[in-house]
Amino acid sequence: MKLYEALAAAFAREDVTDCFALLGDANMHWAGALQELGTRGIYTRHEHAAVAAAAAYARASGKVGVASVTCGPGLTQIMTILPIAVRARLPLVIFAGEAPLNKPWYNQGIDQAPFVAACGAEYRALHDPETMVEEVHRAFADARAQAAPIVLGMPFDLQQQTAPASEPRTGGVRKAKAEESAPDKAALDEAAAWIATAQRPVILAGLGAVAAGAAPACAALAARTGALLATTLPAKGLFRQQDFCLGVAGGYSSVKAREVFAQADLVIAIGARLAAHTFDSGKLTPEARVIHIDLDPQAHVQGRNAADLLVRADARHAAEALTQALPARTGWRSEEMRTTCAEALTIPDDSDTPDGLLHPLAVVKALSQIIPPDAHVINTSGHCAWFTAQMNDHPQENYTVMREFGAIGNGSSFAIGVAAAKPDRPIVLIDGDGSALMHIQELETMQRAGLHVLTIVLNDGAYGSEIHKLRADGVPLHGSVFGRPGFAAVARGFGLAGETITDLAAMTPAYAAFAAGSTPALWDVHISAEITSPQILRAHAAAHASV
């Protein structure tokens, strides 16, 4: 057995069912051996796409995402997705080839570790044949335990050596059950005292609450204390069937929801990362104190004072304990507030545009009525993402968003990863035209891999965020306007079904055709570039006010 075969076998023992890769000299033998062992290889057209797909796969499946790239440029191409995976706390193991050890100078040779370290990830060079198989198993264990990406570097000439005659493991390292430590009683008692005196509390749940299965406990606590419910953007949909829910907190909140958030006097953040976007840098709840209940609660996040009281505890256990400790109160759960919350989650009927093209909110409202809740929706970054975030009919397990690095261009890759993890449902990616063009080649990957993905391009013919900011500044729009390329024709060229949509009525039969099949499709939806999202309007007004 060659070393690359022994390493592939080690990955297979970790129950790796899917691997996303782009081949080169330094990883192609390993990838082929892994596929021969039963792992499905999904071969993308760009290294970034391979690792981004693995990241989305990890988020959607709860498993360790696995990707592979070759040495040198193969490794440097993934520098954008690595910070996303680090900040999103996604467990990944990336098999990266290294330049051969027996060549003092190699065209694709580069010191790879500093690139990975600069992104906040960990690089481990596998150079000892006696230990490298064990190092693979250790990498999987650490990726799971730390919820972080680990890059394994392996020189490709070393891979061709004969593997040591050692007894391989018979099974992979299994994820250890998280310790369920009892909440700090003193901190919980103080939190209960704060909640008991709050007049307008809001419970904010994040992915930590999702992972702990704490949604029912959070809803019970809210009902007990008269609190309203909300989620971070990644946890969107967690309370979609609950009354008194404001939806997403932060920059992507609806206009009506922001009016309510501004009145809150206490935020109980449960298993939620207190990112600046979640609180719109403090502008969302300016009068509220914040309790942070989390396994790793933090007072300071992203350069701001984020919480006033820290409770280190499991999300579900803490919510249940607080529900038992607190008396029943109505809070601000009146019939009027029930109606207000429902209105906050209702997409407005805005449809008029200066140029006669489709209003993005009208498109999103129509999509919310067309796309069923059992389809999986992927929201991306960019100007169009605010509009897409106003869709509130999909449960959290059928919704994916990763915005941890503010990078556009990830949508098609994320869709590939989610589609691989969730083959039982149609995947709907809603992206902007600038983002879609960055990795347009991955449409071919979707077609070749037979992934049931509908890519909806909200095409305003420009870089949306930039054109609206430049227009607000009263300066030339150079570099932000590109026109509308023929996305549908490009999609058809890759073998997908492609349609250009300029009439909302065309979307219903188009979705029915997509849902009835099993192959990917693309819609090029022409929207107006004259409609600015409330998020951009607020941010730009604030920027000008500070000058």
Image (cartoon, grey):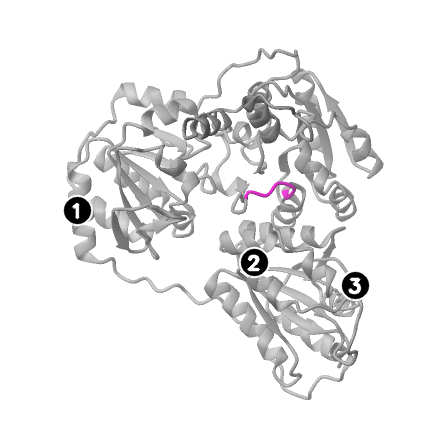
Left or right of 188? Residue 17 is right
- Residues under numbered marks 2 and 1 in contact, where contact means CB atoms less than 8 Å apart: no
Q: Residue furthest bottom?
A: 165
Q: Find disc 1 in the rendering and name its residue.
A: 325
Overall secondary structure of the magenta section:
loop
Q: Is residue 496 above or below residue 207?
A: above
Residue 501 found in image quarter:
top right
Mark 1 is surrounded, within 10 Å at the Cα level, by few (under 14), some (14 to 19) or many (20 or more) other residues, namely some
Q: Amino acid at mark 3?
A: Gly
- Whichever of labels 1 and 3 marks the residue nearer the N terminus, that label is 3
Q: Marks 1 and 3, Cα distance to the nearest angstrom?
A: 60 Å
Q: Marks 2 and 3, Cα distance to the nearest angstrom?
A: 23 Å
- Whichever of labels 2 and 3 marks the residue nearer the N terminus, that label is 3
Q: Which residues are magenta?
A: 406-410
Q: Amino acid at mark 2?
A: Cys
Residue located 54% across and 51% down the image? 59
Mark 2 is surrounded, within 10 Å at the Cα level, by few (under 14), some (14 to 19) or many (20 or more) other residues, namely some
What secondary structure is marked by label 2?
loop
Left or right of 445? Residue 202 is left
Q: Nearer the viewer, residue 539 or 151?
A: 539
Q: Is residue 334 above or below residue 89?
A: above
Residue 278 found in image quarter:
top left
Q: Find disc 2 in the rendering and name its residue.
A: 119
What secondary structure is marked by label 1?
helix
Residue 378 in percent (x, y) is at 58, 38
Residue located 32% across and 44% down the image? 269
Q: Is residue 177 above or below residue 192?
A: below
